[in-house]
């Protein structure tokens, strides 16, 4: 379990912001705990724009209310083990004192505690029968039920016990704090309506394909056509083995990646997290943070700077994901680009639902 400091802003200016110190398995678990502490359903947050800052803190922007959460891992300093055999400062050596001669022991005198002649023993008194114990009366000093601790303290302790919250600071919403968080506004934005209009006709090609893997190739081609990305992949979930496989790959390392024939465990890496949590993620400056899984990138010798990962989801089932790596014109994928890829992913989910359910 790691320890994180999580800043959760209120939704409106009349709300409170809270900063929590939380023990959790990962930063996303810490964020969920923070949201639950405010009584919010973490599952409602579907699109996350993630920026890794210079100080390795994670700023997470959710697109519903445009709030920015800050999560920072707290690394506890390990206590320095003192050498118990050594003393600081070293004790001054005392001079050796010459031993005194041993004094000869004197003979022991009469034991004054004894009585002479011994006193006559008293006759043994017959034991009285044991009386039946009476029921103990109510202890008037105790109160029943016990006095309840203050409500606030009781609630806080229950939250702390359930959520591993070590500390909590609650303040009125600070608008100046919010300005310092999150990403800078990207000036160049895509025209979502125009792209979706063009996609409306192109995306029908997916439905014409009878083979699932060939259909996913079309999904990948359409995504790369309309997105400004170096590389991309379509993944499918293998429920039998509880992992994820590559269904289509594009980019400079596509052939090398195909030869690896990799299977990604559910929950592992960005795409594994995206599929397991059913959440869209756009991450900038991935190379700044070692917590993100980059085994594939290192194996291929292909550095990763930005990632966009969108689940292929329909009616309670996640079929896979579409992932883009390294935006060409910037190191940040935008919320508009999330919307376009999400549109393609939704159509892919419709296709897969029909194929898997045979209707």
Image (cartoon, grey):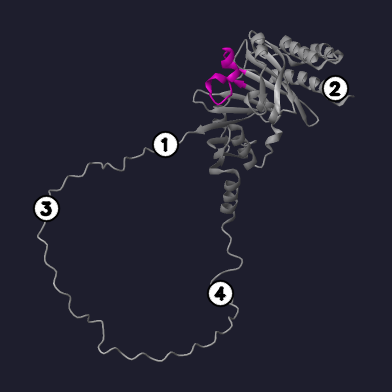
Viewer can see residue 304 = no
Do the residues under discs 2 and 1 have CB atoms within 8 angstroms?
Answer: no
Q: Residues within 10 Å of mark 1 (few under 14, many from 20)?
A: few
Q: Dot 3 lies on which element?
A: loop
- Which span of residues is magenta-colored? 283-306
Marker disc for residue 355: 2
How far apart are the two marked residues, 1 and 4, measured between alpha carbons? 50 Å
Of badges 2 and 4, the one in the foreground is 2
How far apart are the two marked residues, 4 and 3, measured between alpha carbons? 64 Å
Of badges 1 and 4, the one in the foreground is 1
Quadrant location, the N terminus: top right
Q: Residues within 10 Å of mark 2 (few under 14, many from 20)?
A: few
Depth check: 188 or 33 in front? Answer: 33
How far apart are the two marked residues, 2 and 3, measured between alpha carbons? 97 Å
Q: Is residue 10 magenta?
A: no
How far apart are the two marked residues, 3 and 1, measured between alpha carbons? 44 Å
How far apart are the two marked residues, 2 and 1, measured between alpha carbons? 55 Å
Q: Residue at label 3?
A: 97
Q: Residues within 10 Å of mark 4 (few under 14, many from 20)?
A: few
Which numbered disc flags the more N-terminal residue, 3 or 1?
1
In x, y percent, where is residue 71? 56, 32
Which numbered disc flags the more N-terminal residue, 2 or 4?
4
How far apart are the two marked residues, 2 and 4, measured between alpha carbons? 74 Å
Q: Residue at label 4?
A: 140
Of badges 2 and 3, the one in the foreground is 3
Exactly how many numbered labels are in the figure? 4
Do the residues under discs 2 and 3 have CB atoms within 8 angstroms?
Answer: no
In x, y percent, where is residue 314? 80, 27
Q: Dot 4 lies on which element?
A: loop
Q: Residue at label 1?
A: 78
Viewer can see residue 327 = yes
Q: Dot 2 lies on which element?
A: helix
């Amino acid at each position: 379990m790691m320890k994180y400091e999580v800043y959760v802003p209120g939704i409106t200016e009349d709300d409170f912001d809270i900063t929590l110190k939380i023990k959790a398995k990962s930063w996303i678990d810490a964020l969920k705990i923070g949201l639950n502490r405010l009584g919010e359903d973490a599952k409602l947050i579907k699109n996350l724009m993630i920026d890794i800052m210079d100080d390795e803190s994670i700023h997470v922007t959710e697109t519903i209310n445009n709030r920015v959460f800050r999560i920072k891992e707290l690394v506890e300093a390990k206590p320095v083990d003192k050498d118990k055999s050594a003393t600081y400062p070293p004790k001054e050596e005392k001079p050796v004192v010459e031993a005194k001669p041993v004094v000869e022991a004197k003979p022991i005198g009469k034991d004054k505690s004894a009585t002479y002649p011994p006193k006559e023993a008293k006759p043994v008194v017959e034991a009285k029968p044991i009386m039946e114990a009476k029921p103990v009366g109510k202890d008037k000093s105790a109160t029943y039920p016990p006095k309840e601790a203050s409500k606030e303290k009781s609630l806080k302790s229950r939250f702390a016990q359930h959520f591993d919250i070590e500390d909590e600071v609650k303040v009125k919403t600070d608008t100046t704090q919010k300005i310092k968080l999150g990403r800078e506004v990207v000036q160049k934005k895509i025209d979502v309506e125009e792209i979706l209009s063009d996609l409306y006709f192109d995306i029908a090609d997916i439905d014409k394909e009878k083979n699932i893997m060939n259909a996913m190739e079309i999904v990948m081609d359409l995504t790369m056509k309309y997105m400004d990305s170096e590389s991309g992949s379509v993944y499918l979930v293998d429920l039998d083995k509880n992992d994820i496989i590559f269904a289509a790959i594009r980019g400079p390392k596509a052939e090398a990646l195909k030869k690896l024939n990799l299977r990604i465990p559910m929950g592992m890496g960005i795409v594994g997290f995206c599929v397991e949590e059913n959440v869209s993620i756009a991450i900038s400056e991935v190379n700044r943070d070692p917590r993100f899984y980059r085994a594939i990138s290192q194996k291929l010798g292909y550095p990763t700077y930005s990632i966009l990962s969108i689940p292929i989801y329909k009616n309670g089932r996640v079929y896979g994901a579409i992932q883009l790596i390294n935006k060409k014109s910037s190191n940040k994928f935008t919320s508009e680009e999330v919307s376009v890829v999400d549109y393609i992913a939704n159509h892919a989910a419709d296709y897969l639902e029909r194929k898997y359910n045979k209707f």
